[in-house]
Image (cartoon, rainbow, N blue to C red):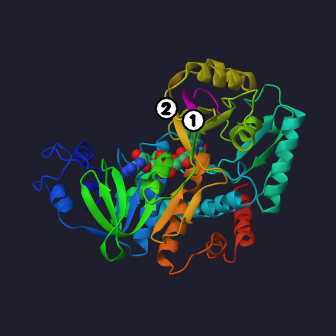
Amino acid sequence: MGQDEAFRLRDLILGGGCAIGRSGRPCGVNRRCRLASEAEHFDVIVVGGGVIGCSVAFYAAGIGARVLVLEKAAFGGGASSANPGSVALSSKQPGRSLDLAIASRILYETLQAELDADLEFAVEGNLTIAETPEELAFVEDLSNGQRLAGVPVRSLSADECRALNPLLEGPIVGGAHCPIDAHTNPFLVTAAFARGAVKRGAQLRPRVEVLGIDQGEAGKLTVRTVNGPITCDHVVNAAGLAAPRIGAMLGLDHDVIPRAGHVAVLEAAGPCARVKTASASQLLAKHGPENPASRAGISLSYNYKPASGTILLGGSNQKGIASREVSLDIMAGIIAGACRLMPRLEDLTILRAWAGVRPYAPGGPILGRAGADERYLAAFGHGGDGMALAPVTGRYVAEQLRSSRELSLEEFLATMPGGGGLAALAVEMNEHAAGDA
Ligand SMILES: Cc1cc2nc3c(=O)[nH]c(=O)nc-3n(C[C@H](O)[C@H](O)[C@H](O)COP(=O)(O)OP(=O)(O)OC[C@H]3O[C@@H](n4cnc5c(N)ncnc54)[C@H](O)[C@@H]3O)c2cc1C
C-alpha cells in the first residue's frame, strides 16, 4: 500500500468494513475484502491506531517486520488527538517514568528528520508555579529528584517566574523552570508515525475492530476481526483505554483507569509568553492521591502554540471518568483558575473546547512482554504521558520483538542514543540546553 493510499478519504469512509458486504463480512469483491478473505499472515499485528500503535508500527517495520495495524475507528481518534502535545520531563516522577521520558525526549530531537515531517516540535521550556508554601515544597522535592537524574531544573522565586511569563500577575510564591521541556503537534506526530510505518511497508486498516485473539495452528495467533480472521506471530496491544479488553482475549487481567481531561482553545492576541506554564496543583492531581478538595483535579496548564496562534488552556484530571463530553462546570473552573493567575487571559476569545480520556495504568505504562505468552506484547497505560513517551515506546517494543529473549527496560535504555545510559543522555541534553540559552 502506498503512502497516499493509506490516507485517502475513501479508505477512512469504507475503512476495513465493506460498502458491498454491509453485514461486516468480507464480500470478496473489492480489494480489501479480497485481502481479508484470503489467508493473511503478518509478523506483527498492532491493535490500536493511536500515537502508540503507530509508533510501534513505525519502529517494528523498521526492523523488517511485516506489520498490520488494526484500528476500530479512525487513526489517532482516541486520546492521541485530545492532548496539547507537551513533551515534558519536569512533570515526571524520578525513576522509571523519568528514565523513559529522558530517552524519548532524546529521540524527539531527531524525530522530525527520521519521519521526514514537520511535527511543530519546539523547545520552549516548562515553568511550574506554586501558589502555596506546601505546593512549593512539593515542587522542590520533585525538582531535586529530577536534578539527580541530570535534568536541568532550576528553582525560581515568584519574581523570576513572572520574568519568564509576564502574564503571571496572580498570587504565586515561586516555582521551577526546565528549559529543555518541549511541545509538539499531536495530530502531526500520530500521522507522521503512521505515514512512516506505511513507507516502511506496514499496512494500516481503519475501522477494523479486533473481536478476539485465539491460539492458531502451528503456534500462530489468530486475530479475529469484523472482517474475518488474520494470523500473526506477535500481537501488540496498543488499544489505549480498551487494552484490558484486548488482554482479556488471552486471559490476562490488565488495569487501565480512565482519567478525563478538558482543554480550551483560545485565540492568542497580543504578546504571549512562549514558556509552557503549569500549576503545581496539576502535578499534585497527576501524581497524588485523590484530592477531596478538587475531585476534578482542576489546575492551570497554559500552552502557547505559535504555529496556530492559539493558546491551549487546561486542564482537569478526572480520575475514573471515561466521558468525552465537555462539562461547562469544569470548563468554567479551569477558566476562572487560569484568569486568577493570568488576569489578561480574560480578554481572549474561546474558539473551541474538548474533553479526552487518558488511559492511565497505576505504576506507569505497561510495555513489552506481559504475561506468559511471549507472542503478546503490551504498549498501553501511558496516562497523561503518551505523546511524550510514544517514540521510546515504539523503539522498545520493536527491540523486544527483535530479541529472542526478554529485554529489560534497563538493558534497552542502555542501548539508546547518547552512549552508555541515562547519565550520558542527560549530559547531551544539558549541552543542548546551554546551546539554546
Ligand atoms: C486532556 C489530555 C491531555 C493530555 N496531555 C498530554 C500531554 O501534554 N503530553 C503527553 O505526552 N500526553 C498527554 N496526554 C496523554 C496522551 O494523549 C495519551 O497517553 C496517548 O494519546 C495514548 O495513546 P494511545 O495510542 O495509547 O491511545 P489512543 O490514542 O486512545 O489509541 C488507542 C486506539 O485503540 C483503538 N482500539 C480500541 N479497541 C480496539 C479494538 N478492539 N480493535 C481495534 N482498535 C481498537 C481505539 O479506537 C484508539 O484509536 C493527554 C491526554 C488527555 C486526554
Depth check, front residue: 150 or 43:
43
**Residue 392 part of the magenta segment:** no
Residue type of the residue flagged with mark 1: Ala
Is 339 located above or below residue 248 in the figure? Answer: above
Left or right of 130? Residue 276 is left
What residue did someone put label 1 on?
260
- 135 is higher (above) or lower (below) than 35: above
Q: Which residues are magenta?
A: 262-272
Amino acid, disc 2: Arg
Q: Is residue 405 left or right of residue 148?
A: left
Q: Could you tell me which quadrant the N terminus lies in? A: bottom left
Residue 128 visible in rendering: yes
- The number of callouts visible is 2
Is 294 left or right of 267, judged from the image as shown?
right
Rendered view: 41 above or below 282: below
Q: Residue 317: x percent and y percent?
A: 64, 35
Q: Disc 1, ligand 1: is the CB inside 8 Å?
A: yes
